[in-house]
């Protein structure tokens, strides 16, 4: 991917789950990468630069202004993503997605560069349309426990689109749907790492509710490929694009599949459903296909194997 060669790319949130995969892909494409992270949910970088000067990092909370190197492209991934994390300090979630995004906007305007913002399928809330298109306005409970994340991500989208309209900023917004893959934290609380950790240890697999709720899980390699395309493609300027895998599965099906992979050692335990947990989630990705020439390549059955190494789940402990 010649586009990234010798570009300076800032990745805020680059020490997180998706961030580390993105940073590695950028390093492989010969970009110079500068990671900004406060390590609240991220961890020590485990990426391999081609040469020592290719990668720099800065421990910094994006809620505070900072001196950041000049960037051709900024990816703003800094935000807790797991419900467990973003609800543990809702005010910090707000600050990160509002003040932090404002700082990233200021920086991209100063650099006259491109900003790729990680938004989320949570902007659709408990969606009224199915599958979700970018034109869906969302169905979010503004005072529920998930709102600190959903509404602050929505506000960040509004802020950035206003900057496109009024300042001609080069901004591209990725509405990322559930992403999974190696490197997720075992204590992260999300379904896939929970199920993989539970199944590999023969502990009960905890399903919230009856498991009929659906999600559409995209392998991180596909999510990263889409983010890179979003940063590159000129026609994506000012656009909001769904990034996800449109194959929809129930949570019970996922639990059974993961259990089978690890030898069916676990029983399935049905536990109370969290408040405002969306019932269905599936992206319409026709815009991403058309605009980015991208389509996810990894089936769930293949993708889940990337979490499986001998008899252990390849999760961070
Ligand atoms: P993650 O929690 O693994 O990574 C987030 C990273 O951001 C961490 O390294 C964390 O330390 C850092 N961070 C958080 N607040 C910060 C702050 N104030 N200043 C600096 N760094 C900060 O999450 P992830 O799964 O890698 O998600 C990355 C991005 O993608 C997030 O913006 C998330 O909202 C979005 N997203 C993820 C998913 C998914 O399924 N993983 C789905 C939709 C959207
Ligand atoms: N979930 C579950 N058991 C768990 C963790 C999650 O049944 O141990 C459910 C959760 O309630 C939701 C779905 O799995 O219905 C996906 O949850 P996750 O936290 O991975 O993502 P999100 O809720 O953000 O879509």
Image (cartoon, helix red, strand yellow):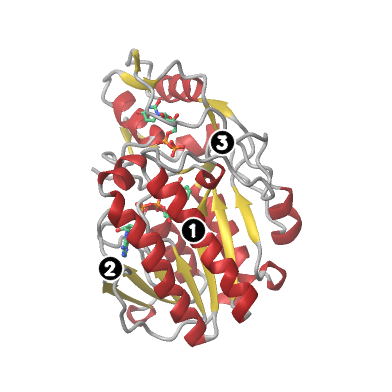
Please tell me the numbered disc located at residue 242. none
Along the polypeptide, which appears first: circle 3 or circle 1? 1
Q: Secondary structure at mark 2?
A: loop
Q: In the displayed structure, does residue 104 sit left or right of residue 91?
A: right
Q: CA distance from mark 2 to mark 1?
A: 19 Å
Q: Residue at x 69, y 49 (%)?
A: 135
Q: In the displayed structure, does residue 38 sit left or right of residue 141?
A: left
Q: In the displayed structure, does residue 131 sit left or right of residue 153?
A: right
Q: Secondary structure at mark 3?
A: loop
Viewer-side residue, 140 vs 25 = 140
Q: Position of residue 186 (x, y in %)?
A: 28, 39
Above or below — where is 47 with respect to 167?
Answer: above
Along the polypeptide, which appears first: circle 2 or circle 3? 2
Q: Are marks 3 and 1 in contact (CB under 8 Å)?
A: no
Q: Residue at x 31, y 43 (%)?
A: 87
For mark 1, what is the residue?
A: 155
């Amino acid at each position: 991917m010649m586009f990234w060669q010798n570009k300076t790319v800032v990745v805020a949130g680059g020490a997180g789950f998706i961030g580390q995969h993105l940073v590695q892909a950028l390093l492989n494409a010969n970009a110079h990468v500068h990671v900004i992270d406060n390590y609240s949910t991220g961890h020590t970088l485990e990426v391999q630069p081609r040469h020592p000067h290719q990668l720099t990092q800065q421990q910094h909370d994006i809620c505070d202004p900072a001196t950041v190197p000049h960037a051709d492209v900024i990816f703003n991934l800094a935000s807790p993503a797991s419900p467990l994390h973003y609800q543990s300090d809702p005010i910090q979630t707000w600050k990160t997605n509002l003040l932090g995004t404002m700082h990233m906007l200021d920086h991209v305007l100063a650099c006259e560069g491109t900003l790729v913002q990680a938004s989320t399928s949570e902007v659709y809330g408990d969606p009224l349309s199915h599958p979700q298109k970018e034109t869906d306005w969302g169905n979010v409970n503004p005072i529920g426990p998930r709102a600190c994340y959903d509404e602050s991500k929505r506000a960040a989208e509004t802020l950035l689109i206003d900057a496109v309209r009024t300042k001609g900023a080069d901004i591209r917004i990725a509405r990322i749907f559930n992403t999974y893959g190696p490197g997720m934290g075992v204590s992260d609380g999300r379904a896939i790492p929970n199920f993989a950790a539970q199944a590999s240890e023969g502990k009960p697999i905890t399903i919230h509710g009856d498991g009929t709720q659906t999600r559409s899980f995209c392998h991180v390699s596909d999510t990263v490929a889409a983010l890179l395309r979003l940063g590159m493609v000129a026609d994506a300027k000012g656009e909001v694009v769904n990034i996800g895998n449109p194959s929809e599965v129930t949570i019970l099906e996922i639990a059974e599949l993961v259990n089978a992979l690890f030898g069916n050692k676990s029983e399935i335990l049905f536990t109370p459903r969290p408040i405002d947990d969306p019932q269905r989630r599936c992206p319409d990705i026709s815009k991403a296909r058309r605009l980015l020439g991208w389509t996810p390549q990894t089936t769930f059955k293949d993708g889940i194997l990337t979490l499986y190494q001998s008899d252990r789940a390849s999760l961070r402990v």
